[in-house]
Image: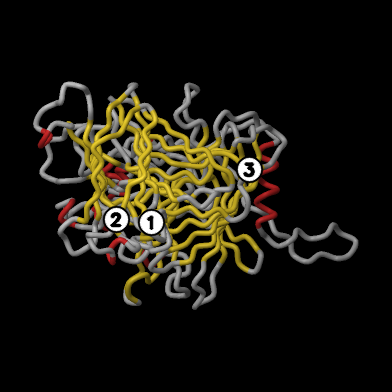
Amino acid sequence: MLLRRYMQVCILSGLLASEAVCAPAPAQLPKPSPSFSFATVQRLARERASRPYKAASARLPGELANLSYDQYRDIRFKRENALWHRQALFEVQLFHRGFNFARKVNVAEVSGGKVLPVAYNPLLFNFGKLKISAKLPANLGFAGLRVHYPLHTPAYKDELIVFLGASYFRVLGRGQNYGISARGLAVDTATERGEEFPYFTDFWLERPAREQRTLRMYALLDSPGVAGAYCFDIRPGAITQVEVLSELYPRHEITKLGIAPLTSMFLYGEDKTSRSFDDFRPEVHDSDGLLANTGAGEWLWRPLGNPRALRVNRFTDTNPRGFGLSQRDRNFANYQDNEARYHLRPSYWIEPLGQWGPGGVELVEIPTDEEIHDNIVAYWVPKAPVQPGKPLRFTYLLNAYSYSPNWPPGGRAVATRTGDAATGGSRSDGEGRRRILVDFAGGDLAGLHASQPVRARIVAKGGSIDDVTIQRLPDSTGTWRASFRVAPKRAEVELRCYLTLYGEALTETWTYQWTR
C-alpha cells in the first residue's frame, strides 16, 4: 500500500560525491576539513544553487526500470544488513532502485564528524522470484531509506519513518498505520505553470549511541528552481515528533513556495452528497479535515471534500501557530475496512518554531474516483516573493499523532452533513436552499446539561442563514448539533460556525465552502 500510494509521484534524482574528510595534517599543509555538520549541507546547497540545475543519475538496467509494482515489492532489504543492526535502538534499511523509483539517492553515515558512504551491494537485498541477468553496477546506489525503532515492543523494531520518492516522507507514532505523507517542499502546486517536484538527493545519518532515543539526519534537496539544506531530529513515541530545519536557496523567482507540505487522500466521508460512490464502506479517507491555529489564536476546522473540479483555498494569516491535516474520526464502525484500517491513520500537526511572517495556509482539493490517489495537499505559502540570492529559513515541528487534547484544546467539529432543505431531505424546496448539520463534541460540551442556552455564531458569505436550532444529542458523548438552512446568493457560499455559552466560545470555528 505504501509503494502503491507513491506511484503518482514524479521522481527526480541527482548525484553528489560524498564529503571528503581529511586526516590531521602538518602545519605547513592546508587546514583539515571541519567535522561534518549542518553548515556542510548548507554549503553544498549554496553551491548547487549557484550552478544551473542538472539531474544526473546513471540509467537503470531495463530489467529494473521496467519492473511492475508487484515485482518491485519482491526486492526486500535483508534485515541483518541494516545500519547499526543490534548496536542501537535505531536501525536503517535501504530501498533498491527500480520501478518508478529510478533516481539514485546517496546515503552516508556520520560518525565522529566523519562521513562514511554506504556502498551499494546486491547482497544487501533479497530479490525473491526476480531473476536479474544484467550485472548491476557497483555505483547503482539506493532509492531511499527507512528507519526502524522498537516503537511498540522491545522484541521488534517497527518502521518509524520512510523517505522514498521525491522529497516525500512518512512518519508514525505508536499504534498508527501509514496514510498521510509529508514533503520537504512544494513548488508551484496547483498553478498553470505546473508543479515542480524537488527531491532529496543525499542523506547523512548521525550514528546514534546504543540507548539514544533521538536520531539526527541531514538531507540535500534539489530541483530546477531551488536547492535546500535540511536537518531532521526524529523523536519516537505515542506522538512521534520530527523537528525540521530547512534553509532554501532559490535559483530563480518562484510563483508559489509551499512550506511544510502535507499530502493525503480523501475519497468520501459521512457527507456523500457531493460525490456518489458504490462502496460498502461508510467512509474512505486518510484525513478528514484541515486544522489551523492562527496567529491571533483562533482555531479553524475545514472538513475535506472530493470536489467535481479542482478547488484551491488560502487562509491568510501572520505568524501561524500551527496547521495540519487530521484524521479526526477514530471509530472503526465508520469505515468498516479491516484491511486499510483507516481509523488508525495518523494526523500530522505542523508547529512553526519562530516567526514565519505574513502568508497563508493553502488547501488544494483534487477530484479523484480512486483511493489510490493522494488528492489533498496543504502547506504554508509565504507572502514575500521568492527571489534568487535570498535564502529562506523555516524551522518547525512535525507531530504524528492519533489524538491530542492540545489540537485544539476545546470543543471540536466531529461531523458535517448536508442535504436538501425540504423536510426529511427527500425533495428540494425549489429555492436551492440547503440544510447543514454540524456536530460538535469535546471540551466543556460534555458537561453541559441540555437546558443550557448554547448558541451558534454563524456567518455566511455569499448566502443567508435561517431556521437555526441547537440541541444536545441523546448520546453519552456530549455531542451538540447545530442545524441551519442556507439560501445561496452566488455559486459559492463560505460558511463559519462555532458554539458559545453566555458569550464565551466553546468550540473551534468550523469553516465550509458549499458549491452549487
User: CB under 8 Å between callouts 2 and 1?
Assistant: yes
Q: Residue at x 10, y 44 (%)?
A: 280
Tag of residue 453 = 2
Q: Is residue 468 left or right of residue 505?
A: left
Q: Residue at x 23, y 40 (%)?
A: 268
In the image shown, does 76 or 403 lie closer to the viewer?
403
Q: Please indicate, yes or no, whether residue 460 appears anywhere in the rendered image.
A: yes
The three-letter amino acid code for the residue at tag 1 is: Tyr
x and y, in percent, of residue 455 in the image = 32, 50
For badge 3, the amino acid type reads Leu
Kindly report which numbered mark, 1 or 3, lies closer to the viewer in this rendering. 1
Tell me which label, 2 or 3, sits earlier in the chain.
Answer: 3
Q: Type of residue at label 2? A: Pro
Comparing 320 with 109, the one in front is: 320
Q: Which residue is mark 3?
A: 248
Residue named by callout 1: 502
